[in-house]
Image: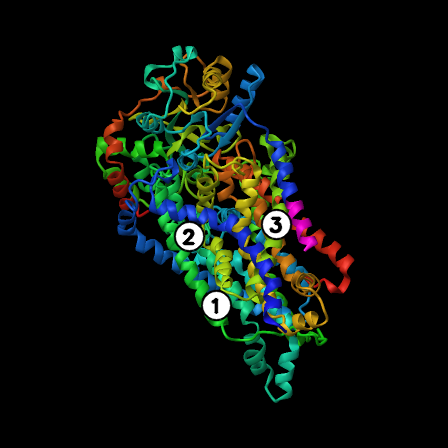
Amino acid sequence: MRAFTAVMGLALALGASLMASTAMADITVYSAGPGGLIDKLAKGYTDKTGVKVNVFQATTGKIMARIESEAANPVVDVLISASWDTATDFAKRGWLIAYASPNAAMVPDFLKNDTAVAQGISALGIAWNPASGTPRPTEWADLAKPAYKDLVTLPDPAQSGASFELVAALQARNGWGLFKDLAANGAIVAGANAEALNPVMQGAKAAVFGAVDYISLAAKAKGESIDVIFPASGTVIAPRPMMILKWSKQPDASKAFIDYVLSDEGQKAVAATYLMPARSDVKANRPLISDLKILPVDAAAVYGTRDTTLAEFAKLLAK
Amino acid sequence: MRRDVKTGGHGLLGWVAGISLSVIVLVPFVFIVLQAIFPDLGRGSFAAPLAHLGRTLADPKLLHLTGNTLTLGLGVMLGCTLIGVPLAVARALFRVPFALVWDVLFLVPFMIPPYIATLGWIMSMQPRGYLQQLTGVNLGPLLFSVPGMVLIMSLNLFPVVYFALSRTIEAVGTRYGDVGRVFGARPVRAFFRITLPLATPGLAASLLLVFALAIEEYGTPAALGSRFGFQVLVTGIENRISDWPIDLPGAAILSLLLVGLSLVAFLIQRRILAGRNYDTVSGKPQAREKRALGALALPVSLAFALVAFLATGLPILAILATALSKTISGGLKPSNMGLQNFVEVLANSGGALQALVNSLSLGIATALLAGALGAITAYAVVKGRGRGRLALDMLAMLPSALPGVVVAVGMILAWNQPWLPFTPYNTPLILLIAYCCILLPQPVRYASAAFQQIGDNLEAAARVAGARPFTVFRRIMLPLVLPSLITSMLLVFAVASRELVASLLVAPVGMMTIAGFIWRQFEQGSVGLGMTMSFIAIVLTTLIPMLLIAVLRRIAGGRFTGLH
């Protein structure tokens, strides 16, 4: 038995030594990807203010699951989601603190409200592999043409808020015809955004219908054979809301964090990941909102019928 | 021997096992059950009990998901039997050329995260994948199908059967078969009537484990199934947890369904084993002679080589090829190959090195804790007496029926209660507990199968000679099960070092693990960097156990028989 006690003790000691490496944080930020960006922002903020930031980074869905499970004893101070819908939902639950950052003056009105302000914005486009031997697509409908037979992937709108808005917006404008044609042309639904992009990079597929642009732009910058095309007929954008939770014990430090993300330095870090900065006066090496045609999305209406839209989509694409 | 003396010793170990398992397994499970009943549990409210039940169970997709789950579980069981049993029998009874090499190679699939292995397969087999780039052959249609998925999962899981069964048959030895032959049975008959039936505990336990692992596996169905619309319960649960709106009660109900499936399998296994005696390890000395294969040496070696290549070689090569590629779209051209991804990981980009240190320490801690608990639990279950045994056994089995993501949610619900004076939540201890919970079935299964083969008379003899119960456990029982136990602890180490699903959800803020790092890279489209980290992790989790075994063999000499 002594051996067992020793083994257990060793195991617990190993755990405890790991524990020592995570000190108590001053503020806790839950953020959707990209991971490099939130690390950079946390470090920049700590360098400026001396307040330590503890980061939990995961997909928006995983973060929501964690917040739901933690609701009895929440620890998150600042939440950065990849879907504006989160901000609407949390505001409705009364979970958010109102805050207007002085640095948000140059953020356009449609990217902020009383309780949330955008960190950056992504847009959806066609991610196309020029080495795929297919003609360069310019419109969503091109991907239903015979040249792209069996060569198109779509991110799952059930797993990505932006994809869902794109499906809803295109369906509101033209009905389900386009998606029927895509299905008939062998397009497949392939998991979340990155899973839809991967086969296109290797060339198994030629294009992603509605890819999150910044991932593809970053891949292109790394030398991947990927182009991002924004159809002239219009696309949707996904502003990424930042919120302060009402149970935060550090509201001032949290507000200062939002200020930092919206500062020149913070917005440059956002732009460096190929997201569109939230502030209209910060430059970025990519097309900006003013260069794109944005499809109208009536959030209340499309989210009101989300279940039926997703069910219809799943039926058409045989998901 | 007086019965009360015997229960005294087992009783204490039983209590240790019972209390530990309650904390590690029962507490989160109870919270999942509560969550299934009370939808607002997360907010500390017991309002509207069972409001979700009707809606979740009335979902027409539910039957479909359950059917797919069963198809997959039974398919993978069959696949693992077809691949694992012949190889295990050959390995245990005959002198297979390069046996040690095959053992090592068959161990590697445990070190490859299933999600990564599947991604390797996809990148090799999909149109314009590595296979087509090299040979012009496109096997995409085979890969993206149910048989393809079953095959890939079987190749990932068959080592469970292979190691358990070859170890068991080896313990049975050729001796009992030889006795049969003395009485006139022909070799084949002696094998099927004597050796194989005596190996039933190992086979049944490992197949049960395969079934449980297959139905709760997330990575492969998620990566592969999404490409051809094949959804199982686990992906359904995952969707409920990570798609808006989050449906924790629905996920909890589906999890309980999954637990039900595993419990049925578990009861069937108990039924098979009940009332029979599989004691084969007695005090008598045994010759461990293996037979020569003769003319069959070449075909048998080729079969081992083929399986080793498919299960280990191909995924590893695909992972390595991706890790060495400068760009994915550049393909397998010399000009596109380079070490820049490795340089980036070693330069600690994105906290890669901390992730390695964190995960490897957690893996070691988990292996020690789960191994110790597994041995005590298995001993109490197999050799103990009393009513608690079945409960203990089921408790130890429970986690293999719980998907990692559900364990994670249960952990958060349980350990983040505001009234707790001390909580492991938001410290690395929560990961240690979560890993122990998820992986405990492995050492318990392996150690139980080993204990089942130890005759009661060995223990009785020791007690008659005056040894106290702990001494018997420590000096007689433990050394006899140690090879099996260490094998399972190495598996625990490997799996815990790269566990994905629970790590992503319960990891304390600011702590990076290997799987978290890999996943983060994939999410950002940096597949090459993710694959590089995977490759490094696979190499480390393979080499560390190998070194350990080499050291143990040096110290213990012939007495250490694990993984020879």
Task: Point out which mark residue B102 bears.
Answer: none
- As drawn, the residue found furthest toward the bottom would be B184
Placement of B155 over or under B195, stated as above or below: above
* Residue type highlighted by circle 3: Leu
- Residue at 39%, 39% in the rendered image: B242
- Mark 3, chain letter? B
Q: Residues within 10 Å of mark 1 (few under 14, many from 20)?
A: some
In the rendered structure, the answer to whether residue B247 lies left or right of residue B538 reads left
* Residue type highlighted by circle 2: Phe
Residue under pointer 1: B270
Give the magenta part as a residue range.
Answer: A1-11
- Residue at 63%, 35% in the rendered image: B353
* Residue type highlighted by circle 1: Arg
Q: Position of residue B378 (x, y in %)?
A: 57, 61
Residue under pointer 3: B369
**Who comes first in sequence, dot 2 or dot 3?**
2
Q: Position of residue B62 (x, y in %)?
A: 31, 52
**Who comes first in sequence, dot 3 or dot 1?**
1
Q: Position of residue A62 (x, y in %)?
A: 43, 37
The span from disc 3 to disc 1 (Cα, nearest Å) is 26 Å
Displayed quadrant of residue A300: top left
The span from disc 2 to disc 1 (Cα, nearest Å) is 36 Å
State the scheme by which the image is colored. Answer: rainbow
Q: Nearer the viewer, mark 2 or mark 1?
A: 1
Q: Residues within 10 Å of mark 3 (few under 14, many from 20)?
A: many
Residue A50 is one of the magenta-drawn residues: no
Q: Residues within 10 Å of mark 2 (few under 14, many from 20)?
A: many
Placement of B98 over or under B522, stated as above or below: below
- Residue at 47%, 46% in the rendered image: B128
- Residue at 57%, 65% in the rendered image: B384
Q: Where is the C terminus of chain B found, in terms of image quarters?
A: bottom right
